[in-house]
Image (cartoon, rainbow, N blue to C red):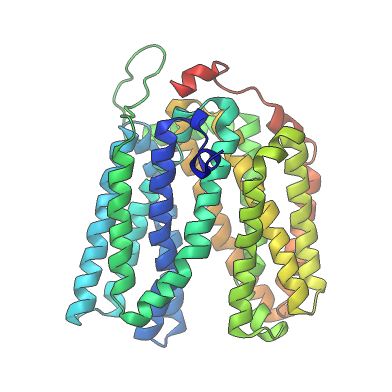
Amino acid sequence: MGIAEWVAPRRLGRDFRWLFASSVTSNIGDGIALAAAPLLIASMTDSPVLVASGAIMQYLPWLLFGLHAGAIADRVDRRLLIMVANGIRALVLIGLCVFLVTGIASIWMVLIVAFLYGTAEVFVDTTSSTLLPMMVRTSDLGIGNARLQAGFLVANQLGGPPLGAFLFALGSFWPFAVQGLCVALAIVLISRIAATRRIELADGPRERTPVHTDILSGIRWLWRNPPVRTLVIIILAFNVTWAAPWGVLVLYATDYLQMGPVGYGALTTASAIGGLAATLLFGRLERRFSFATLMRVCLSAEVLMHLAFALTTTGTVAFVIMIAFGAYAFVWATISTTVRQRLVPHELQGRIASVNMVGVFGGLVIGQALGGVIAQVWGPTGPWWFAFVGAAITLVLVWRPITHIAAAKPVDDDEDAAAA
């Protein structure tokens, strides 16, 4: 079996390979910015508030435009929407490079650029998540999502950040110039996918309605579908508990564990290593265990991970825990995405995916705010104890519903229809 066949099996189809290639290319660019953007902001200001604002620009567009992006993705050619949004991202990066080369860039310009880029990214990411169910059979959604997760880990978490730091050392504009090239190439690759015209309802073309009406119809469908609704609530709750300690991880690693900046960097990389190993083995896990079993194992591991971090006092042990975290976290991400895609009708994929992502980023904002306050009052291990208790309570409440979520009947039992 060749590498290409192993990474993107032929049974997933030609369009999946174009989607995978576009995703990897785009994520290399985003991984470059993951390291370069904070370095750029830190080189322009000493204000902690302004430095933190750079991170806020990643979340704010999701909270402002996430639901609209999902509704629009459900009413237009999804491939074309991705291409247009990526084109806007490329133009924004070109503008940033011009500002940097001419020396007129200011911290406020950079923050505005980050907001504009993040807004376009909301439309790209939301719409991209709707393409896989249109390309592959229902039974292949798991392996398809696992391969996309693996590509994300290699490009965004492992390869991109070191390259971004290296390019920034050559010149402040170089990382963003290369990122722009990556985005432009992603447009070319996604254009090779067959047209993905708006899905029509079974009773014929639907009447054009206001975007907010489409958003409300998606939310109503979600509320009336217990398995998907419960899954979204689980993701929201666990993101709140996860984000509480993660927001102050740098302080926990450098001050409490005495790992230093290099050790902190290694700690964050460890999760990507564990995640890559697990996603590459996902096919075997999917064949040997039910989704309900895997979901319970992953959430139980999350609870134990918080407890382990609260108790450990050495960087070596923390490194091992983080590898385990990456392994189960990315298996969970693959399963939860696959289950949602199986249960949601094609014409609602964008809206339900956007509600899920708004919940994810809303949970991150709430969790990080709580984590900062808890760490201020009870020290760097306080957020881990909060996360342990909160995640444990949530797990007890959702233990039984997980069976119904994993066993819920897919929307479309005709697998060939999804692969057409």
Question: From where the camera sits, is residue 53 visible?
Answer: no
Residue 315 in the image: state x and y as whole percent: 73, 78
What residue is at 28 percent from the left and 75 percent from the top?
A: 173
For this orientation, the residue located farthest to the left is: 102
Horizontal side of residue 110 vs 129, given as left or right: left
- 373 left or right, relative to 160: right
Q: How many marks?
A: 0
Image quarter hosting the C terminus: top left
Name the quadrant of the N terminus.
Answer: top right
Using the rendered view, name the quadrant where residue 177 is placed: bottom left
The answer to whether residue 100 is seen in the rendering is: yes
158 left or right, relative to 309: left
Residue 249, by quadrant, is bottom right
Q: Residue at x 23, y 71 (%)?
A: 97
Rendered location of residue 359, percent (x, y): 54, 49
Residue 213 coordinates in the image, percent (x, y): 38, 32
What residue is rendered at 81% in x and 46% in y?
A: 396
- Most extreme residue toward the top is 203
Question: Is 291 or 16 nearer to us in this picture?
Answer: 16
344 lies above or below 72: above
Residue 308 falls in image quadrant: bottom right
Q: Is residue 200 above or below residue 119?
A: above
Residue 314 point in image, percent of width and height: 78, 79
Front position in the image: 72 or 220: 72
Residue 400 vs 387, above or below: the answer is above
